[in-house]
Structure formats: structure tokens, C-alpha cells
């Protein structure tokens, strides 16, 4: 892999996503304000909070029945609730990079259209079910900061708890587990005094595609644009690059 560090790739992707996350919250808040319909009032009638203030009264509390109704609606137990479903799309980015795109949406048609459009604009395409996922397998992944950590002790603790592998990726040690063993291994590491940055289930590629700087730029931009879509929750890919390429991407 030309001296490639998996953590370097992960760190670059994570940094790009984290940098945009603040913008996304601000954007969502602004869109909510802009879409909020004007309140209809009878001529000469003040909004409830203002009217109560002018009369020296407190705003009337929300009725328990309204709270209960809102909870039921949010949980999908009442008419008018949005029905969310998990959908997984498979696709290709430039240079033959495979993508698995996990969505949570209340509108299947909207999600499909937005994912397809974004892929097309980024010189990618949707793929048939199974044509990409065959090259991925679900794993548990625990990322442990390497500073001050004895690798041998970490390896021994993780292995005894059922971990499949532990790799030294420079700034971090990555513990790989079966999907059903993630909680058990994470708990064992905590009890042994190991701190961790993250512990998640991920889709791990069996084979990776090493990209040039130009292709890495294109793929990174496409993944960023997919991540901007409201319905997209997780994106997994099988691209990798040399340390030199990753360093150049980090500088841009």
C-alpha cells in the first residue's frame, strides 16, 4: 500500500466531515426559520405570549395531552407521524471506487433521486444491489489513541475479549472485532483502563483502490457532497492513497 496508513485516510475523511458539520447545523436552523409559515391572527388580536404579557399573565402551560400527543407522533404511534425507513444504496465514484450509502428517510423517492443526482454530478453512478457490497463486510472498530499505550498489553486484552485484530496506525491503534463482539471488547478495554476515541460498527472493504491525487480529490468531493444530503447517515468506500497524497489533501 505504498506505506499507506488507514488512519491517515480515516482522519482526512473525518476531518472533512467534522469541518462541515457545524455548517450543516447552521444551514438546517436557517432553513427551518425560512420555511416556518407566518402565524395567522384575527384582526387586532395579539399573539398569545404578547397578549398575556400585556395583561400581566404568564404564558399558559402546554397541556399534558398535547405533550403526550407530540411524543406519540414522534414515535410513530399517531396519525401524522413521519414513517422513517433505513435504505442502503450502492454506487461507484470515479476511478471505480465502490460506495455504500446508508440513508434514513421519510421519503424513499426523494432520497433515491438526491443520491442518484449527486452521484451523476460527481461522475459516479448508482449500482445494482450486491455489486458493491460483496467487497465489504461489517465489523466492529475501536480506535484507541496510541500515546502512552503499551501495544502488547492492548493486543493481549483485546484478543482475550474476542477481538479479531489490532493494528498500529501511528497516532492510533485500531481494534477490529466481529459485529456482535464490539460491546464485549469495548467493555474489556474500558475495565483494563484503555481510553478510546470511537467504537462503532463499520463496513470494512476487503479490497481497496489506491488513488492518485487527482482522483482522490474527485472522490473526496463526491463523498462530501453525498454527506451533505439530509437523508444520508453513513458512507463507506474502498479508496485509499499514499501518505504523500493524503498529506497534500490535508493541505488543501
Image: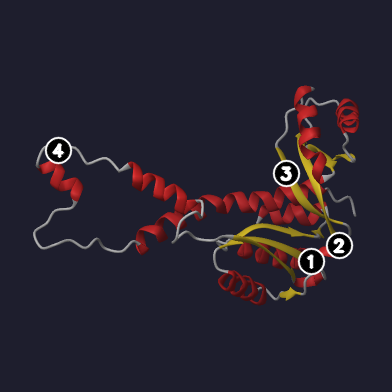
Between the C-alphas of marks 4 and 1, the distance is: 61 Å
Mark 2 and mark 1 in contact? Answer it, CB < 8 Å: yes
In this view, 118 is above or below 42: below
Nearer-N-terminus badge (3/2): 2
Name the residue tied to disc 4: 57
Residue drawn at x 72%, y 47% is 11
- Mark before the other along the chain sequence, 2 or 1: 1
Visible residue check, residue 119: yes
Residue to which mark 3 is pinned: 200
Kindly tell me whether residue 145 is visible in this rendering.
no
Residue 193, image x, y percentages? 76, 22
Q: Residues within 10 Å of mark 1 (few under 14, many from 20)?
A: many
Residue 29 x %, y %: 42, 54
Q: What residue would you read off at disc 1?
A: 98
Label 2, on which residue?
135
Residue at (45% x, 60% y) in the render: 79
| Comes first in the chain, label 3 or label 4 | 4
Amino acid at each position: 500500500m505504498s506505506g499507506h496508513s488507514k488512519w491517515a485516510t480515516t482522519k482526512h475523511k473525518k476531518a472533512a466531515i467534522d469541518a462541515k458539520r457545524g455548517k450543516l447545523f447552521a444551514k438546517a436552523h436557517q432553513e427551518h426559520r425560512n420555511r416556518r409559515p407566518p402565524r395567522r391572527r384575527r384582526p387586532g388580536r395579539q399573539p398569545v405570549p404578547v397578549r398575556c404579557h400585556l395583561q400581566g399573565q404568564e404564558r399558559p402551560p402546554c397541556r399534558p395531552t398535547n405533550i403526550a400527543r407530540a411524543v406519540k407522533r414522534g414515535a410513530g404511534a399517531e396519525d401524522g407521524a413521519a414513517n422513517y425507513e433505513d435504505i442502503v444504496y450502492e454506487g461507484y465514484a470515479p476511478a471505480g471506487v465502490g460506495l455504500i450509502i446508508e440513508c434514513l428517510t421519510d421519503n424513499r423517492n426523494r432520497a433515491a433521486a438526491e443520491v442518484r443526482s449527486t452521484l451523476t454530478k460527481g461522475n459516479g453512478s448508482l449500482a445494482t444491489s450486491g455489486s458493491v457490497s460483496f467487497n465489504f463486510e461489517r465489523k466492529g472498530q475501536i480506535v484507541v489513541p496510541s500515546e502512552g499505550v503499551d501495544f502488547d498489553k492492548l493486543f493481549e486484552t483485546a484478543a482475550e475479549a474476542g477481538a479479531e485484530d489490532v493494528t498500529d496506525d501511528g497516532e492510533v491503534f485500531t481494534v477490529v472485532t466481529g459485529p456482535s463482539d464490539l460491546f464485549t471488547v469495548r467493555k474489556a478495554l474500558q475495565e483494563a483502563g484503555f481510553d478510546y476515541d470511537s467504537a462503532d460498527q463499520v463496513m470494512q472493504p476487503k479490497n481497496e483502490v489506491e488513488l492518485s491525487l487527482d482522483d482522490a480529490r474527485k472522490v473526496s468531493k463526491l463523498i462530501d457532497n453525498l454527506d451533505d444530503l439530509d437523508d444520508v447517515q453513513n458512507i463507506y468506500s474502498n479508496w485509499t492513497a499514499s501518505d504523500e497524497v493524503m498529506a497534500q489533501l490535508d493541505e488543501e
